[in-house]
Amino acid sequence: MKIIDQQGKEHFTHEVEFCGTVVKCTPDSDRRKREELGQYESMQRAAEVMAGIYSARSFEKSEFQMPER
């Protein structure tokens, strides 16, 4: 899945996680790295964004745009 982060950079990934208020991914090109996709005002908001990513994936969408804060 292609995810466009808050700064407009494209990431190709199948693994997404969040820690506190930061949403990160493991890029398909280098499974050892973690790249930041976005930072949010609360842990709850980060979890909501994660749910949006999983929902897009379950509906087989090929792209997800990270929302601003």
Image (cartoon, rainbow, N blue to C red):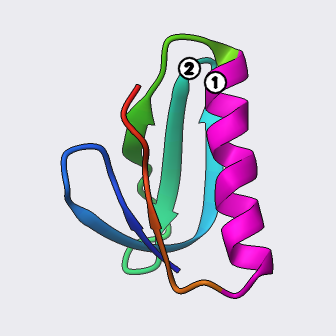
Magenta highlight on residue 46: yes
- Which residue has dot 1 on it? 45
Magenta highlight on residue 59: yes
Q: In the current view of this chain or complex, which residue is farthest to the top?
A: 41
Question: Where residue 13 sits: x, y (%)?
Answer: 51, 73
Mark 2 is on which residue type?
Answer: Thr
Residues under labels 2 and 1: Cα distance?
8 Å
Q: Main secondary structure of the magenta part?
A: helix
Q: Quadrant of the C terminus?
A: top left
Circle 1 Cα neighbour tier, 10 Å, few/some/many (<14 / 14–19 / ≥20):
some
Question: Where residue 28 sits: x, y (%)?
Answer: 46, 79
Horizontal relation, residue 50 to residue 7: left or right:
right
Asked if disc 2 and disc 1 are in contact, CB closer than 8 Å, the reply is yes
Quarter holding residue 20: top right
* Badge 1 element: helix
Q: Is 50 placed above or below 47 here?
A: below
Question: Where residue 1 sits: x, y (%)?
Answer: 53, 80
Taking the spot 70% from the left edge, 88% from the top edge, the residue there is: 60
Q: Which mark sits nearer the N-terminus, 2 or 1?
A: 2
Taking the spot 62% from the left edge, 41% from the top edge, the residue there is: 49
> Bounds of the magenta span?
44-60
- Which residue has dot 2 on it? 21
Q: Nearer the viewer, residue 45 or 35?
A: 45
